Image (cartoon, rainbow, N blue to C red):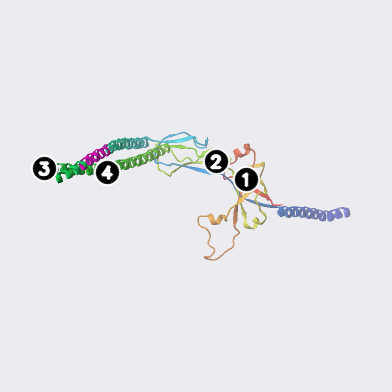
């Protein structure tokens, strides 16, 4: 009995000693771990999600995809009824053709007025010769009338011819100036016609652009989700039709407490544990930090200057790049919960 009592008395201290050793070991390991790691389970997988927006309004004519289907960049996904846009394009093309026709008319007018100015210039030379001849005759007859060799009637006739030649010369000059001004006017009309053609060309290009918008293509490669469009539905310009989760754009947003940021640096190694795949070992690295806490981006950010103030530890979003094989990356979905541990030393 005495031996059993001694054994029972020794067993309790031994158990306490073992528990103390285990507790001390656990505490030391936890302390050492905390000195070189920063952990948080307030983290989730994110990705770049591209909304696909209708750029013109119209009725949905065809849909070429299913929800959750993988699509490639540039793939045709939705077609709107384009008959109205084709008619507008035809109208713009017809207006352009009409404006182009006015250019031909203006060029013909320029040719005609140029020919008229050439004729007017020739008339000036003819009138100048006639005026010179008339002046010569007038000079000779002026001398003859003084000598009494001719009658006054003959002299008056020569003078009248001189005055008529002078008037014809001045009229030819005025006609030539008018023809030059007409050429300038027709050239200005040609410039106006060219401007009109440029405007109509721009309208044709715009109509073509609007017509191209009736085909909605995938802006990026990824998986289609949240399809909000059906065949026959009337959509408006600017309406979101569906979203595409981009390929190869997965990352983790980890919300660390502000008291944990002291030792966090870009490029530090991160151990990642995904709740959906707990047996998969995944690594990553710190990519960058948000410029503000998450509360500042909320719909109603807190205002500590009003009411009673209660200090609450804020969290800062930290972006973490994932380094994993393609097979695992294909299984990950935005919104999945993860736990991250950053190696700070």
Magenta stretch: residue 127 in it?
Answer: yes
Task: Measuring from the top left, give residue 288's x and y in whole percent.
Answer: 61, 50
Q: Can I make out residue 246 in this image?
A: yes
Image check: 17 left or right of 337?
right
Along the line of sight, which residue is nearer the eye, 251 or 212? 212
Do labels 1 and 4 touch, CB within 8 Å?
Answer: no
Mark number, residue 43: none
27 in relation to 174, above or below = below
Neighbor class of circle 2 (other Cα within 10 Å; few <14, some 14-19, many 20+) is: many
Q: Which residue is mark 3?
A: 153
- Judged from the image, the secondary structure of the residue bearing numbered disc 1 is strand
Mark number, residue 321: 1
Mark number, residue 246: 2
Residue stretch in magenta: 119-135
Q: Residue at x 62, y 37 (%)?
A: 326
Mark number, residue 177: 4
Is most of the magenta stretch helix, strand or loop? helix
Image check: 148 left or right of 244?
left
Neighbor class of circle 3 (other Cα within 10 Å; few <14, some 14-19, many 20+) is: few
Q: Mark 1, mark 3: which one is toward the viewer?
A: 3
Which tag, 4 or 2, sits closer to the chain's start?
A: 4
Which tag, 1 or 4, sits closer to the chain's start?
A: 4
């Amino acid at each position: 009995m005495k031996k059993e009592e001694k054994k029972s008395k020794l067993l309790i201290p031994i158990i306490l000693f073992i528990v103390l050793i285990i507790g001390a070991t656990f505490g030391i390991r936890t302390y050492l771990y905390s000195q070189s790691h920063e952990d948080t389970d307030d983290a989730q997988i994110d990705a770049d999600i591209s909304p696909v927006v209708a750029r013109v309004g119209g009725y949905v004519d065809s849909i070429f995809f299913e929800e959750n289907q993988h699509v490639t960049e540039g793939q045709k996904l939705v077609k709107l009824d384009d008959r109205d846009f084709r008619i507008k394009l035809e109208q713009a093309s017809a207006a352009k053709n009409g404006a182009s026709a006015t250019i031909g008319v203006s060029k013909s007018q320029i040719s005609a007025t140029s020919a008229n100015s050439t004729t007017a210039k020739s008339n000036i030379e003819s009138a100048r010769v006639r005026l010179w001849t008339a002046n010569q005759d007038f000079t000779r007859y002026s001398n003859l009338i003084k000598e009494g060799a001719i009658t006054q009637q003959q002299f008056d006739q020569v003078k009248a011819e001189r005055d008529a030649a002078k008037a014809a010369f001045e009229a030819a000059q005025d006609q030539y100036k008018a023809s030059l001004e007409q050429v300038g006017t027709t050239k200005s009309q040609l410039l106006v016609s060219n401007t009109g053609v440029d405007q109509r060309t721009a309208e044709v290009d715009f109509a073509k652009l609007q017509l191209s918008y009736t085909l909605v293509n995938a802006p990026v490669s990824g998986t289609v989700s949240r399809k909000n469009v059906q065949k026959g539905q009337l959509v408006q310009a600017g309406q979101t039709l569906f979203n595409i989760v981009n390929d190869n754009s997965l990352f983790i947003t980890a919300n660390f407490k502000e008291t944990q940021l002291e030792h966090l640096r870009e490029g530090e190694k991160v151990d990642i544990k995904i709740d959906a795949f707990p047996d998969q070992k995944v690594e990553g690295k710190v990519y960058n930090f948000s410029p503000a806490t998450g509360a500042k981006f909320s719909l109603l950010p807190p205002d500590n200057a009003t009411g009673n103030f209660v200090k609450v530890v804020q969290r800062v979003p930290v972006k973490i790049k994932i380094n994993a094989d393609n097979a695992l990356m294909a299984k990950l979905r935005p919104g999945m919960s993860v736990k991250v541990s950053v190696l700070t030393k």
